[in-house]
Image (cartoon, grey):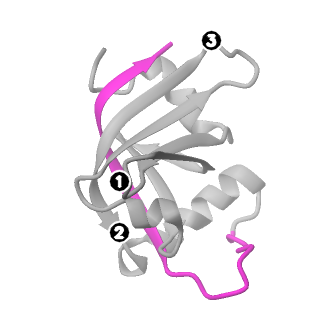
Amino acid sequence: MSNQIPESTYDLFERPILCALSTINPDGQPHTVPVWCDREGGYVRVNSPDFTRKARNMHTGSRVTVLIIDPQQPYHWVEVQGHIVEIRDESHGSWDHINSLAKKYTGNPVYQSYNKMPENRLMYVIQPDKVNGR
């Protein structure tokens, strides 16, 4: 086990594969949801509206896990156990980030929200503590 994302798994972050993000609810129960994610250097990044359960579970220092499994090769996967080191708002690129994820996952260069209300988007930067994968 390492605290660095192996190069052999970089392709999982570059392809439009949904990631499973696990956070911890206030009662201690794990909360896992599918999210879009990417990698910047040695960090994993996810993005969320601030009103979601996952967003309410994440603050600087929160422990999280991201799991990506290649749908064509199920034994090609990466699990990143880490903690939130930075939370960026709109003035620090959160909307640019969600737009780049939209391009990657949908082909549309602008994110289209499914919510009817305005969204305050936040980008969460995850520092790996333990990384497993093949």
Which amino acid, mark 1? Answer: Val
Please give the residue where the numbered disc 1 appears in the rendered image.
125
Please give the residue where the numbered disc 3 appears in the rendered image.
75
Residue 42 in view here: no
Instruction: Report if the CB atoms under discs 3 and 1 are less than 8 Å apart.
Output: no
Please give the residue where the numbered disc 2 appears in the rendered image.
88
Instruction: Report if the CB atoms under discs 2 and 1 are less than 8 Å apart.
Output: yes
Please name which of the two marks, 2 or 3, marks the residue nearer to the observer.
Answer: 3
The residue sitting at 52% across, 32% down in the picture is 67
Q: Position of residue 31 (x, y in %)?
A: 51, 48
Which amino acid, mark 3? Answer: Tyr
Which amino acid, mark 2? Answer: Arg
| Residue 66 position (above or below residue 122) | above
Q: CA distance from mark 2 to mark 1?
A: 8 Å
Residue range (magenta): 110-134
User: Residue 18 or 43: which is nearer the viewer?
Assistant: 18
Quadrant of res 107? bottom right
Quadrant of res 89? bottom left
Q: Position of residue 92 (x, y in %)?
A: 35, 74
